[in-house]
Image (cartoon, rainbow, N blue to C red):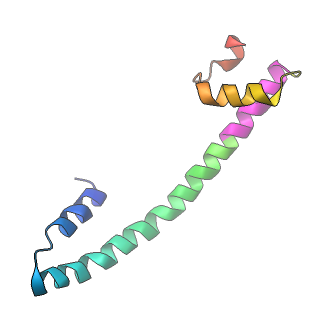
């Protein structure tokens, strides 16, 4: 069971009344710490995707220097898994 699923399971078993409020108070900090811990990874992942996109465009420009920006968008949406220069 992943940490995310474990937190969701804890939230799902809140119960009612006073016990439910106590469980909510106990799970809220755990959930907050989890979100805080994942944010740096999301930032790094977004930066990686941007660098990968730029790298693909540079390689595409080397193979086909006269290509239009429309081709770059098509290339990104088709995701030819690293075989794009051979396909063009």
Mark count: 0
Foreground residue among 39 and 12 = 12
Left or right of residue 74: residue 35: left
> Which quarter of the picture shows residue 36?
bottom left
| Residue at position x 18%, y 84% in the image | 21
The C terminus sits in image quarter:
top right
In x, y percent, where is residue 1? Answer: 22, 53
In x, y percent, where is residue 25? Answer: 25, 83
> Which quarter of the picture shows residue 13?
bottom left
In x, y percent, where is residue 3? Answer: 29, 60
Left or right of residue 73: residue 1: left
Magenta residues, start to end: 52-64
Residue at far bottom of view: 18
In x, y percent, where is residue 83? Answer: 63, 18
Overall secondary structure of the magenta section: helix
| Residue at position x 74%, y 39% in the image | 54
Left or right of residue 5: residue 77: right
């Amino acid at each position: 069971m992943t940490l995310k699923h474990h937190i969701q399971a804890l939230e799902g078993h809140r119960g009612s009344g006073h016990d439910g409020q106590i469980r909510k108070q106990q799970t809220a900090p755990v959930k907050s710490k989890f979100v805080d811990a994942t944010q740096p990874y999301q930032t790094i992942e977004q930066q990686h995707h941007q660098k990968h996109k730029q790298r693909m465009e540079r390689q595409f420009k080397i193979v086909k220097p006269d290509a239009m920006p429309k081709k770059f968008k098509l290339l990104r949406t088709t995701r030819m898994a690293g075989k794009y220069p051979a396909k063009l």
